[in-house]
Amino acid sequence: MAASKKRSGQFKPLSKSSFLSRHWHVKHFLIGALVIIIVIAGLFGYSKYHADHRQNQLQPFYNTAGLSLAGPMGQVVRSEPLGVQVQNGSALRVLYRSQQANGTATFSSGMVFIPNNDNSGTPRPVVAWAHGTVGMGDQCAPSRTQNPTSNIDWVNAMLAKGWVVTATDYAGLGTPGTEGYLVGGDEAKDVLNSVRALQYIPSAHAGATFAVFGHSQGGHSALFTAAEASTYAPDLHLVGTVAAAPAAELVALLNETSGTTLDWVIGPEVLESWPPVYPGLNPQAVTTKFGYNNYKKIANQCIVAAALQGQVRNKFKQQFFSTDVAKIPAWNAAAQSETAPILAPPQPVLVAESLSDKVVLPNTTALYIKQACQAGSDLTSIWINNVSHQDIPSIISPQVISWINSRFQGQASISNCGQALPVTPAAAPTT
């Protein structure tokens, strides 16, 4: 009996305080972990407070209530210093009149960079920048961010050459309304009207001659801009188009990225943007429960947050689309309508891509190049490697500036359509 009591005493559970007192290292680890969690939460809250405070301070500039939509396209209705230092020039935040593809007047915001020299003479030539996917929340608009020039470090080199750079946010991004994400007609008008806006900024001394440079979504924008320039803006003179990693072949891109994290990044924005343009599209019919319940919220996050959420959801095997959306007739037709146009000669176009691109897949860009060359486009391609999607514009900027400079000087471009593609093109879409 005594032995039995002894054995039962040996297995008497330790109290929580007794355990921590004996295992002091566990106690210190738990305290340290708690401190780290509190610090991270505090830093996140501090950062969010300042981000929200910044957006609240900026909001009056972007508030279009009471402003008249009647007036010339591109007319600047509001401007102020951007609040950042740039080499070789100065920067403005602008609000200007623009137009949707259906003809509805609207407002777009953006940035203007003005050189402090006349190295290219006056009136100054213009480069219109079209940015890539950033998220559809107002806070994601490039002109509203804390570091608006962080992704366009090449702008200083353009200013040094005496070029004016205009950079649209796109209407509905930063301003009231919904951004026409991958809606080529909307994007093109925002870009073209951003060039017209310069005529309302006397200090820019900008001419009507311009080149367009776009990346990712902005590559899509640039190609549509080139296709519409002569009819929508005959007052302007486009000399060249640069499309870096362009989201050009949308059907192929949707097919190639189906089931990946990109569905959670691109999908929500497409579902927000396309149904108002193509009323036959039903988001609920092509999304999972997780996708449908969250797409509006994700669409209005900025790109980094959306990508992280997509990675987490993929880890938990949560799919965004419930079906292969590119094979649904109505969605396939919309994607084909928004596939980038082939530019007819003699319009010179430069297309650049990285073989390491995990966002706009290289074989989809190869498909666009193949089809454009077969159609006789005056196309030059640049292929690089070991460069991420986001870094492509910066890496190729010296070549881009040289190519654009030749166009401004009236030199003929030299197509390299005859060279072999470094990657097998994706399959062309079928109707």
Image (tube, helix red, strand yellow):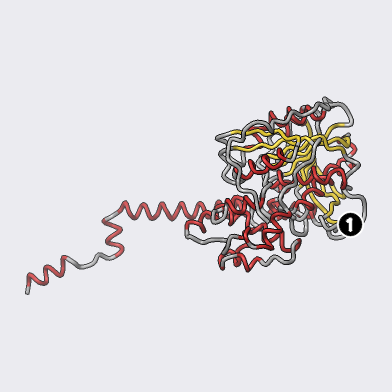
Expressed as whole percent of the image width and height from the top left, the position of residue 23 reads: 28, 55
Q: Is residue 287 left or right of residue 375?
A: left
Task: Check the image and report above or below for 104 versus 396.
Answer: below
Identify which residue, 219 or 307, lies in the foreground.
219
Looking at the picture, which amino acid does disc 1 mark? Leu
Residue depicted at 69% across the width and 42% down the height? 371
Pinpoint residue 229: horizontal percent, then vertical percent. Answer: 84, 44
Residue at left offset 54%, top offset 54%: 260
Question: Does residue 283 appear in the picture of this structure?
Answer: yes
Q: Which residue is mark 1?
A: 69
Q: Residue drawn 61% across and 48% down?
A: 427
- Work out which quarter of the rendered image holds the N terminus and state it: bottom left
- Asked whether residue 52 appears in the rendered view, the answer is no
Vertical order, 47 against 121 (above or below): below
Decide which of 45, 352 is in the foreground and name it: 352
Q: Report the residue that reaches farthest toward the bottom.
A: 1
Please tell me whether mark 1 sits on a helix, a strand or a loop.
loop
